[in-house]
Image (tube, rainbow, N blue to C red):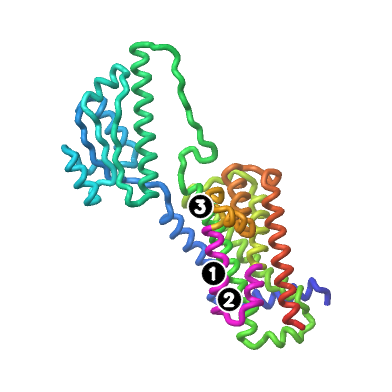
Amino acid sequence: MTPFWKALAVAHKELRQIQRDRRTLLILLFVPAFFLLVYGYALNFDIRHVRLAVQDNDRSAASRELISAFLNSGYFDLVAEAMTPAAIDRLIDRDDARAVLVIPARFGADVAVGRPTAVQFIVNGDNANTATTVVSYGVSLISAQSARAEVQARLASPAGPMLSVEPRVWYNPELRSALFLVPGLIAYIAMLTAVVSTALSIVREKEAGTMEQVRMSPVGPVPYVLGKTAPYFVVSLASSMSIVVAAMLLFDLPMRGSWVVLVGVVSLFLVGALAFGLLISSIADTQQVAFQVALLTSFLPTLMLSGFIFPIASMPTFLQVVTYAVPARYFLVALRGVVLKGVGPAVFWQDLVALAVFAVVILGLASLRVKRQWA
């Protein structure tokens, strides 16, 4: 019997095992969809309905227009009107308001003639991430109103040429955090489920006492590893692509590239992830240990060191070096390139090479480990 048919026989046997093992089916099919729903809706950097208080010391048409700009943006809800600085302190201290807009007297008169004026925007900084986002919202709205007022003042009294800026954001013009987070969630879920599922495969044979029978069979270590990987690859690929489709339906994730390229990128990533799970399974002696090691080595690196949430360029140098060993780093670049930018492999070929090297090295290590146990 050739190695191909040996691997096919092992794959057929493993597929029947997967059908009987409801826990593995649950991990491969339902857990990814559950993670996508939970993280996709809960993990969101877009902040809405920020509680806003206003101290309008001018009460002019211009001040009312500025307040309306905040309320009509969809980011702020007016919850109180502060009359004194002490009232502002109470609102912030009690967390009744997250931000306070203070409009000075003569604001409308200064705006009408183009005279420089200042607007104070106070933000509760007890949550740094939220405060940074709220500050950017407020500055953006005030800058937009300032530009409008400057144009109107210059039209009323021309004062020479004026320099204007028209920012354009490519691939995500609305700056929706979902388009940034969902590709990372796809990588995170695919890596986690693939590694955990195969990490339990070989160690299951050890606990069941059938590993000795496998060693005595004429299969061989390499066909055995390939046969163990093939069923999980098919199921994981179907699960991953269903996650992509679900993300497009639920979160309006665009698909600007080729589906064929997307399937190829996902397949290459899954081969490395499944091989890594097999390597863990060949080392661990119990399913409990295999599950814990798989969770630790796939969850934290993919979440923390792949550029999914935290920019790699902002990390210390030694951590930036570590990220080169995280396959999700390369997968995210390729996935975002296909889905968001619509580019082809010629743009991210280096990331594909890195994924291929990772898959070959880990698959080779898993085969060597099994071969050593075979002896």
Instruction: Classify residue 355 by image quadrant.
Output: bottom right
Give coordinates of residue 196: x percent, y percent: 57, 70
Q: Would you place residue 159 above or below residue 103 in this image?
A: above
Image: magenta residue range: 276-304
Give coordinates of residue 238: x percent, y percent: 60, 61
Q: Label 3: which residue?
A: 310
In the rendered structure, the answer to whether residue 114 lies left or right of residue 163 reads: left
Tell me which amino acid carries mark 1: Leu
Cα gap from disc 2 to disc 3, whole angstroms: 28 Å
Q: Is residue 250 magenta?
A: no
Q: Would you place residue 161 above or below residue 177 in this image?
A: above
Q: Label 2: which residue?
A: 290
Quarter of the image with the C terminus is: bottom right
**Contact, mark 3 vs mark 1 (Cβ under 8 Å):** no
Cα gap from disc 2 to disc 1, whole angstroms: 8 Å
In the rendered structure, the answer to whether residue 366 lies left or right of residue 331 reads: right
Dot 1: element: helix
Q: Is residue 303 magenta?
A: yes
Dot 2: element: helix
Cα gap from disc 3 to disc 1, whole angstroms: 20 Å
Quarter of the image with the N terminus is: bottom right
Residue 295's mark? 1
Q: Residue at x 62, y 47 (%)?
A: 338
**Contact, mark 2 vs mark 1 (Cβ under 8 Å):** no
